[in-house]
Amino acid sequence: MAALSDAGSVRQFNEDAIATDPDAGIAVLADGMGGHRAGEVASRMAARIVFDHLQSRVIAFRSSAGAHSALQALDESINRANKAVFDASRAEAGHHGMGTTLAVTLFYDNRVALGHIGDSRVYRLRDGALAALTRDDSLLREEIDRGWITAADAGESHNRSLVTRALGVEPQARAHLAEDDAREGDLYVVCSDGLNDLVDDADIALILSALHVNLPLAAGQLVQAAKDNGGYDNVSVILAKVLQPFPAASRQRWTRWLRWLR
Amino acid sequence: MAKIVLSIGGTIVQQRFVDTETIEIGGQADSGLVVDDRAVDPKHAAIRCVGNDHILEDLGSRAGTWVNGTRVTRHILQHGDVVQLGSFYLRYLNPRASEVDFERTMLIAELPGPSDTGGQAHSSNTPPARSRVRFPSGHARMTAGARAGQTVALDRVIAMFGLSGQGRAVVTRRPHGYFVTHVEGRRHPRVNGASIGTQPRALAHGDRVEVGGEAFEFAQD
């Protein structure tokens, strides 16, 4: 795993927050919003709460309980973070209206659980092909879905910075949860819009394909490409590569037992 | 706030703010913007407001809707755009629009009605904002390795050289020039005979680069 977060070429502060634990298979990214640096408060708070909660549940979702408990842990962590940010935004005047996007990957038992809200994304590079595993909660996305503008024209839109959902802005979080199989060689990308708003998918795929053998360099090149293309937003990226299969502990024992039988 | 200005023969005949959800444009008397011209249909076109965007849409008009000389069916209006309607010109003014692009993330209500088109997360991702950054142009004339004799265009953000096992490096294209960086392998790339180590090295026209069994001469156009 490699992770990098940068304020970008224009902004003074970094309102993105990231937290990773390669051993536990956890990657969390949050992109905060709100005036007077409240966005920074929201993203850090959310990333920390989600990360801590998932870490505390690692034993549980790595055991035979499987998908159900991983998604459940993810859901719990997001709801906790939502409540904390929401409560904090009401407790202090300077924090009023703050919120954050969130994108999380959680690897367990040859699978990955995904959680996201807002316009932070998760991509997967498999066999050289880049696929977006999340769908932005953004006005621009809706304009395209409704056929009001074409995806090709979206580059001319002025709605880049408008998200339709965020964490911590309402009592209940409306996050998207999903899961996917994770194969050996897969490369997962968790990023803030400071990356994909400035670097197109083809260039992201090209950089990852060339540099997947050197993840820190790949992360550095992605951030550099975003900054070279204008870098007017904070840019954060987490890269997680599946080096080998990672079956749940209990199943491993079961396989060993089978082998012993034969 | 955005403004539209209708003129004919250099004279302004009408102007208004784009302050309603939609503005219908046509010859019909109750249109938001009435354009009385034989080439303009009763319901010719409309401007739809979505967030910070004003989307001009042709309503199937006979003569079509033309923006800056190009016929459009749908178009996101940009500051200074000129829409031709028969003998009339409609100018769109929104000087703040370009600033909006650099604004910080804000929350906006979801659009009413169904929005989920069925979980097609993989289709038509929102592409990046149009870049205004200018990049240099260069190429590599291969002098050794499997590609010897070929010319490799350096027209993308990154290009790979060398072989796995023998050492690999990338050439990155940046606004202020090209750089070569070591990626993997025990042997680091050499530029004009000297090892570059692990740090990026700026390339100058005519530099000779050796990396993992390949060699090339760098040329900047």
Image (tube, grey):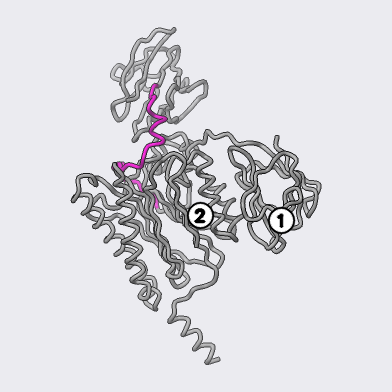
In what element is the residue under mark 2?
A: strand
Image height check: is A94 above or below A52? Answer: above
Where the C terminus of chain A falls, by quadrant?
Answer: bottom right
* Chain under callout 1: B
Q: Is residue B193 magenta?
A: no
Q: Nearer the viewer, residue B49 or A104?
A: A104
- At 42% from the left and 9% from the top, the residue drawn is B8
* Chain under callout 2: A
Which numbered dot is residue B162?
1
Residues at marks 1 and 2 on the same chain: no
In what element is the residue under mark 1?
A: strand
Q: Position of residue A22 (x, y in %)?
A: 46, 67
Within 10 Å of disc 1 (Cα), the crowding (few <14, some 14-19, many 20+) is many
Which numbered dot is residue A175?
none
Residue at which label 2 appears: A131
Res A194 seen here: yes
